[in-house]
Image (tube, rainbow, N blue to C red):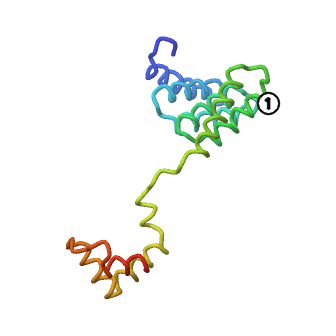
């Protein structure tokens, strides 16, 4: 792993797991390989497997937090770092990662949500309202006028649009 041969390390840890599937370290180290290869979902599964074997293995919680952070699941990342710190309270890496994750959560909650047209169009209430509006002959005439470019700032069509 230290030489950057993540695929080779992944293969070695997979073989080790086949030989001894009850060793949490093998799963946790394979999770690190998966993370380095940007396969964070597989890293999460391996960390969970390691924790099934040894629920007190703080490094598995730490790596689980890193994988969740990479997937931008900051809530689960925070939970993982908290658990890692409960098991190993003096670990500076876990402390720093928890602080960074809490900062990301704060920034995410303060950020304005991204506009998503797909979500907007999937809203049944909005679609019902749009269908009703477009079925109205008056609205159809007004939209036709707007689309043709014949709208004057004081025209009745624009007044009707503002009334709708």
Q: Position of residue 67 (x, y in %)?
A: 57, 34
Quarter location, residue 66: top right
Q: Residue at x 44, y 56 (%)?
A: 116
Quarter that holds the C terminus: bottom left
Q: Are there few (<14), some (14-19), or many (20+) residues within 10 Å of tag 1?
A: few
Horizontal side of residue 151 vs 163, given as left or right: left
Between 51 and 90, which is closer to the camera in this rendering? 90
Q: Residue furthest front?
A: 154
Q: Quadrant of residue 48?
A: top right
Residue 84: % across, % down? 73, 29
Q: What residue is shown at x 70% (from left), y 33% (from top)?
A: 53
As drawn, the residue found furthest toward the top would be 3
Residue 35 placement (x, y as % from top left)? 51, 29
Q: Give the secondary structure at mark 1.
A: helix
Q: Nearer the viewer, residue 128 or 111?
A: 111
Residue at the far bottom in the pictured view: 137
Residue in the picture at 47% in, 24% down: 11
Residue 37 is situated, as x and y percent measured from the top left of the image, at 45, 28
Residue sitting nearer the eye, 71 or 33:
71
Position of 157 with respect to 28 (left or right) is left
Residue 22 vertical position relative to residue 141 in the rendered view, above or below: above
Question: Residue 37 or 132: which is nearer the viewer?
Answer: 132
Return the residue at label 1: 86
Q: How many marks?
A: 1
Does residue 12 appear to the left or right of 133 in the view shown? right
Classify 151 as above or below 75.
below
Residue 133's place in the image compared with 46, above or below, is: below
């Amino acid at each position: 792993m230290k030489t950057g041969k993540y695929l080779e390390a992944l293969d070695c840890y997979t073989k080790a797991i086949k030989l001894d599937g009850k060793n949490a370290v093998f799963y946790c180290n394979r999770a690190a390989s998966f993370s380095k290869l940007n396969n964070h979902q597989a890293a999460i599964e391996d960390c969970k497997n390691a924790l099934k074997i040894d629920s007190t293995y703080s490094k598995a919680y730490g790596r689980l937090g890193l994988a969740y952070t990479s997937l931008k699941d900051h809530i689960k990342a925070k939970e993982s770092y908290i658990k890692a710190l409960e098991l190993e309270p003096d670990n500076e890496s876990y402390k720093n990662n928890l602080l960074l994750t809490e900062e990301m959560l704060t920034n995410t909650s303060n950020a304005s949500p991204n506009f998503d047209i797909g979500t907007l169009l999937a809203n049944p209430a909005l679609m019902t309202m749009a269908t009703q509006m477009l079925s109205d002959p008056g609205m159809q005439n007004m939209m036709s006028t707007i689309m043709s470019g014949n709208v004057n700032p004081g025209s009745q069509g624009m007044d009707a649009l503002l009334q709708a």
